[in-house]
Amino acid sequence: MSKNYHKLKLNYKIWIETDLHVSILGEGKWKLLTAIKETGSLKAAVESMGLSYRQTWTKLKEIEEKLGFPIIEKSRGGAEGGHTSLTPQGEKIVEFFDKVYSKFEPRVKDIFSKLVQDLNTIHKPN
Amino acid sequence: MSKNYHKLKLNYKIWIETDLHVSILGEGKWKLLTAIKETGSLKAAVESMGLSYRQTWTKLKEIEEKLGFPIIEKSRGGAEGGHTSLTPQGEKIVEFFDKVYSKFEPRVKDIFSKLVQDLNTIHKPN
DNA sequence: TATCGATATGAATAATTTTGCAAGTCGGTG
DNA sequence: CACCGACTTGCAAAATTATTCATATCGATA
């Protein structure tokens, strides 16, 4: 039972879910969508992030199934083999997360920094 | 690909972690600790929450291992068989989460309610 | 000092998730 | 009109997690 840290911190996650509490996507898929947007390819995005293509593909399908509309647009064929881009809805979701983090992150950090002081007054027993 | 919801929402989780990003405990264990505090028994707390004693016990050990100090105090024997209470540090952690949620929750809800309006302007394609 | 019931813990089993691989599909382009 | 490489998809294997069950330990108290 030895401490392997210097200070305790708070962390958090945000995600989009339905009004029936079915979680849909969060930071990870936001980054993935951003990478798809930048590379124009699911394969490239996945590889740049060190993810499994199989699993990522499956999860994207699940997300679209839950949302009820497509967020990526795929095409096959051509010298490039194919490519993937975001639908207008996919773009909006990326923009939404951009805004969430830019608005939310600073305020959370601010609140956290005050709270964490209390946290680090909890020490080992005498 | 049909909508099975009326509106999209945001949700979040908060947890304590080390400065090396090792997550330690969050809302679930907060509730568990609260139940232990109220019942004076790990078994009772676990059963009231519908959790597995084995797994809960294991996770509590892991939490203490990561923290570097004990958060619960157990005793065996007696007509009651034994009981479990929180250490002063355990109490402080519960109080910390009490404060986190009472301070954080209202603000988050406020921020979320504004952001979610944007979210629900994302619709199906025409 | 025998009893009782919660704490403590190993180990087998089941369930879930992740990973990996193979093979087929597609169509713009040279 | 053959080729190329990303998109698709099924399925088995591997890795993780969770659940269950059995059994031992402990000690205040009657």
Image: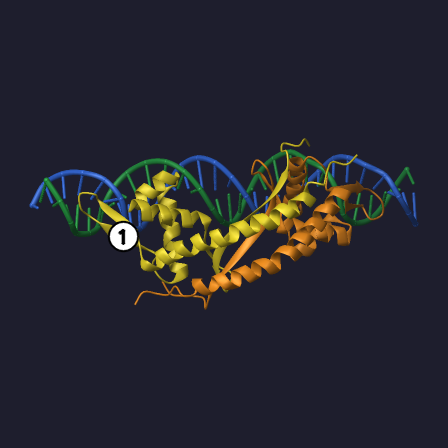
Chain colours: A yellow, B orange, C green, D blue
Mark 1 Cα shell of 10 Å, populated few (<14), some (14-19), many (≥20)? few
Question: Exactly how many numbered labels are in the figure?
Answer: 1
Note whether residue B31 is visible: no
- Point out the image quarter for the C terminus of chain A: top right
Q: In the rendered structure, the residue with mark 1 lies on which chain?
A: A
Residue B88 visible at all: yes
Q: Report x, y in % for residue D5.
A: 23, 40
Q: Residue at x 32, y 49 (%)?
A: A37
Residue B72: % across, % down: 74, 43
- Horizontal arrangement in the rendering, residue B10 relative to residue B50 (left or right): left
Depth order, front residue of B106/B49: B106
Compared with A90, A123 (above or below) is above
Residue in the image at 73% along x and 48% along y: B42
Q: For the point 76% across and 51% down, which residue is it?
A: B37
Identify residue for label 1: A74
Quadrant for the N terminus of chain A in the image? top right
Residue A94: x %, y % from top left = 39, 54
- Residue drawn at (64%, 33%) of the image: A6
Closer to the camera, A79 or D8? A79
What amino acid is labelled 1 in the image? Lys
Residue A28 versus residue D4 in the image, above or below: below
Place of residue B59 in the rendered image (x, y in percent of width and height, measured from the top left) = 64, 42
